[in-house]
Amino acid sequence: MNLTDNLSEAFCEVRAALEPLRDDAAAKAMAAYMKNNFEFLGIKTTPRRKAVAPILARRSLDWPLVWDCWHADAREYQYVAGDHLRRIKVFPPAQLDSLRELISTKSWWDSVDSLAKVAGSALGDAAPPTDRAHPASQVIRAWANDRNMWVRRAAIISQLGKREATDLQLLADAIEENLPGTRFGNEFFISKAIGWALRDLYRTNPSWVLSFLDLHGVANLTRREALKHHR
């Protein structure tokens, strides 16, 4: 049996759209930027999205496509999977376990940050400011104490861009599980994520952020990131 027999039709279409755009010189530079953790085709974001847009536009949530992209060697395929998932306006909370598996596989900041936004969409935009009973809120709370550092990062930054719809208690809980002295509290990617989440919220709720920083011992990196826009 040919190995391609087990691949989804959508993935085969994506591959056919991307392969002609391969650029070996760009691929080498992109791999170096990502610490040579992944192979690349050498396709930048805009042409990649343009090439696959007609394919993704025809599909609702397509897990066979997502997993085929995730198992592919070139990193651009994981980016396509992330683009597809972010097209889902409200991600189904019942499928967050599958999203966690993606976050914890082939993990690096690029894929994790993309998927964190998907997790945040599962909360919805009209959710009450604090709703511990919300199924997505319960999952993200558990992620904040996950055995995997990248899953924790996703929990911390899952509400980026939510502004007034931010669940402040969920954000506080996620951060408090990852302050210095906790299991991953001294990791760069965690300290940076906390600072990013606070900086983003500062735009719409500076008093909450300043109060949180006064009450909690955060890493110096976190504080610098959080207060970038503070005057």
Image (cartoon, helix red, strand yellow):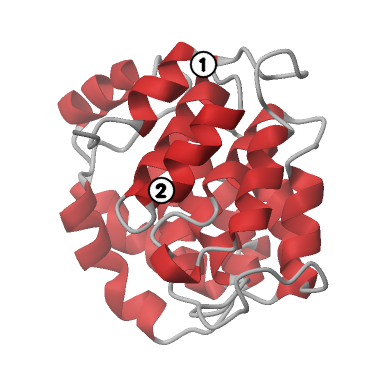
For label 1, count other residues whose C-alpha is less than 10 Å away and answer few (under 14), some (14-19) or many (20+).
few
Image position, residue 93 (x, y; %)? 73, 72
Query: In the drawing, does residue 141 fall left or right of residue 82?
Result: right
Foreground of the two, 107 or 17: 107
Residue 156 sits above or below residue 84 on the image: above
Foreground of the two, 213 or 39: 213
Q: Nearer the viewer, mark 2 or mark 1?
A: 2
Image position, residue 40 (x, y; %)? 35, 33
Quadrant location, the C terminus: top left
Determine the CA span between mark 2 and mark 1.
26 Å
Quadrant of the rendered image containing residue 198: top left
Foreground of the two, 86 or 142: 142
Q: Residue at x 55, y 21 (%)?
A: 218
Task: Please give the residue where the numbered disc 2 appears in the rendered image.
Answer: 207
Query: In the drawing, does residue 81 fall left or right of residue 76?
Result: right
Task: Please give the residue where the numbered disc 1 appears in the rendered image.
Answer: 188
- Find numbered disc 2 in the image and state the secondary structure of the residue it sits on: helix
Quadrant of the rendered image containing residue 95: bottom right
Image position, residue 24 (x, y; %)? 21, 29
Q: Earlier in the sequence, mark 2 or mark 1?
A: 1
Residue 8 sits above or below residue 22 on the image: below
Residue 112 sits above or below residue 20 on the image: above
- Find numbered disc 1 in the image and state the secondary structure of the residue it sits on: helix
What count of labels does the image hold? Answer: 2
Residue 60 appears in the rendering: yes
